[in-house]
Amino acid sequence: MIAPAFVLVVGMAAGCGSSSNGSGGGSGTAHVLYAGSLVNLMDKQVGPAFSRATGNGYQGYGSDSQSVANAIKSKIQVGDVFISASPTVDATLQGSANGDWLSWYTTFAQSPLVIGYDAKGSYAAKLRTEPWYQVLTRPGIKVGITDPVLDPKGKLTAAALTAAQQTYHLPTGFAKSVRANAAVFP
């Protein structure tokens, strides 16, 4: 499912008619703004494949989705295509109140929110045998999340922790405690 979705994105970029001089003449460079989680995919696979297929250049810029949307609104970044990690972020670019930067968007892929850990780490065995929410509260465990204000994955993580607190009937403050003890990455 992901491969066809990215073919669609390449096709959208090809139809933008971007040019290196901004004239929209249908040749030149496609400027693609995207969620930072797509850096390797975009710059090592999709961008080069686009250039080979079209003969046009590719210029990518990746950062957390909200920062890219803010850069678009502030006219710091200009692109032919914006690929965010969240429809909520996309909506901040729609409508006259938001500058009419975006007239439509589509969701083309999804991925689950997962807990990644070092299989040789000191808490690996516990994560395989005990409920994850219990392991995350153990003294000494190091948890990292992305900034929920800037990154959709961070926002989803915060929501998942809150949902876990309710679903598993965990003590009030579980979600807040895990987030407070986590290293937050931009």
Image: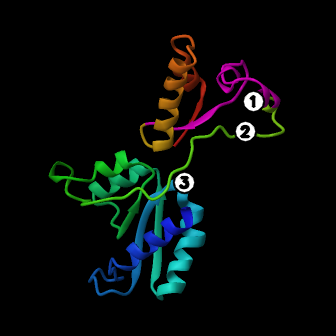
Query: N-terminal of the two: label 3 or label 2?
Result: 3
Considering depth in this image, is 18 or 132 the residue closer to the camera?
132
Q: Are marks 1 and 2 in contact (CB under 8 Å)?
A: yes
Query: N-terminal of the two: label 1 or label 2?
Result: 2
Mark 3 or 1: the one toward you? 1
Measured from the top left, where is residue 130 in percent x and y? 75, 23
Residue holding disc 2? 117
| Residue at far top of view | 171
Measured from the top left, where is residue 26 in percent x and y? 33, 86
Decide whether residue 73 is among the magenta residues: no
Amino acid tagged 1: Leu
Measured from the top left, where is residue 68 in percent x and y? 39, 54
Residue holding disc 3? 37
Decide whether residue 147 is among the magenta residues: yes
Q: Which mark is residue 181?
A: none
Q: Residues within 10 Å of mark 2 (few under 14, many from 20)?
A: few
> Looking at the image, what colour scheme do you see?
rainbow
Q: Is residue 80 above or below residue 185?
A: below
Q: Which residues are magenta?
A: 125-148
Quarter location, residue 30: bottom left
Amino acid tagged 2: Tyr
* Rendered residue at 35%/53% (across/down): 69
Say which element carries label 2.
loop
Residue holding disc 1? 127
Q: Are marks 3 and 2 in contact (CB under 8 Å)?
A: no
